[in-house]
Image (cartoon, rainbow, N blue to C red):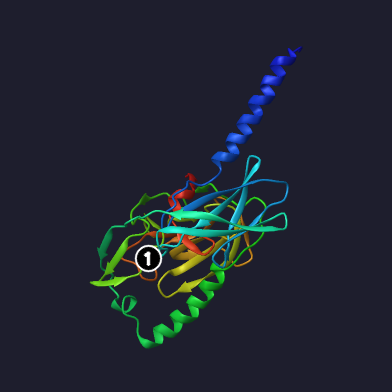
Amino acid sequence: MFRDPSSIAALGLLAGFLSFASAALALPQEAAVPGGLALVRLGEGAERPQAWFGERRVAVVRDGKAWVALVGLPLALAPGEHRLRVLAGGNEETRPVRVAVKRYPTQRFSVPDQRKVEPLPEDMLRIEREQKRIDEIKALFRDEPEPALAFRQPAQGRPTGNFGLRRVINGLERSPHAGIDFAVPVGTPVRAAGAGVVVETGDFFFNGNSVYLDHGQGLVTLYCHLERIDVAPGERLAAGQTLGLSGNTGRSSGPHLHWTVLANGAAVDPRLFLGKK
């Protein structure tokens, strides 16, 4: 069928616009606050720049023709201006990362096992071993050209515990809530939020049965308090693939799934990455 050349050109422009829009929509939301994510535009170019926030290398992804650094901002980060170190085309420069103030509310709850709140000396030895492995996972950076960015909700349940809550457990102040929770009964399928490689599984003192999934470029998701783990380290998972069943293991006040998103080693608000369920 004959088409007018101007119509073909218009369709081409529309397709290009939609392609660009899709790329833009694939980016997570920006929230330049402690526990959030800063999107720093690094300009155009054929070669992917490299960027570091402190000592951590950060994800750099393409948005249309431009490169964008996805900078995870730790919950303990002081508000104010920080610097991103960028290496592009053999030249090194710094870019400002301005972090605004955010105050998180306090959550008070109880867990039945006081030992999970005040560990015994032998527990501390185990916790220290586990923390060393967790720190190694946080330092991972696997060069993945197109890491998963638009995550899906890992379990069909109502979100409960919000990210960043300052927690008082059994009357004692403890570390902030580094993820979000989903209220699901024991045995609910838990699915990979995005495609990735399993880097660790196991029973952790606080997190219970857990799975760490590496999506590349320093983006890692963590699934905690599982009843059952159905994957093993080194296994590649597709987005939505079942990795285990939800449970009530570790330091838990009841059956639920805890889900954490790490960006360059910093726990950030998972809602910034949620694309679809």
Residue found at x 63% / y 39%: 64
Q: Is residue 25 above or below residue 233?
A: above
Q: Residues within 10 Å of mark 1 (few under 14, many from 20)?
A: many
Q: Quadrant of residue 102?
A: bottom left
Residue 26 at x, y = what percent? Answer: 56, 43
Of the residues shown, which amino acid type is indicated by label 1?
Answer: Asn
Residue found at x 35% / y 81%: 119
Decide which of 56, 151 is in the foreground and name it: 56
Q: Is residue 225 visible?
A: yes
Residue 218 at x, y = what percent? Answer: 58, 60
Q: Quadrant of residue 164?
A: bottom left
Which quarter of the rendering shows the N terminus? top right
Residue found at x 27% / y 61%: 107
Q: Work out which residue is located at the far left of the displayed protein and give it.
A: 171
Residue 133 at x, y = what percent? Answer: 53, 75
Q: Is residue 230 visible?
A: no
Residue at the spot of label 1 = 248
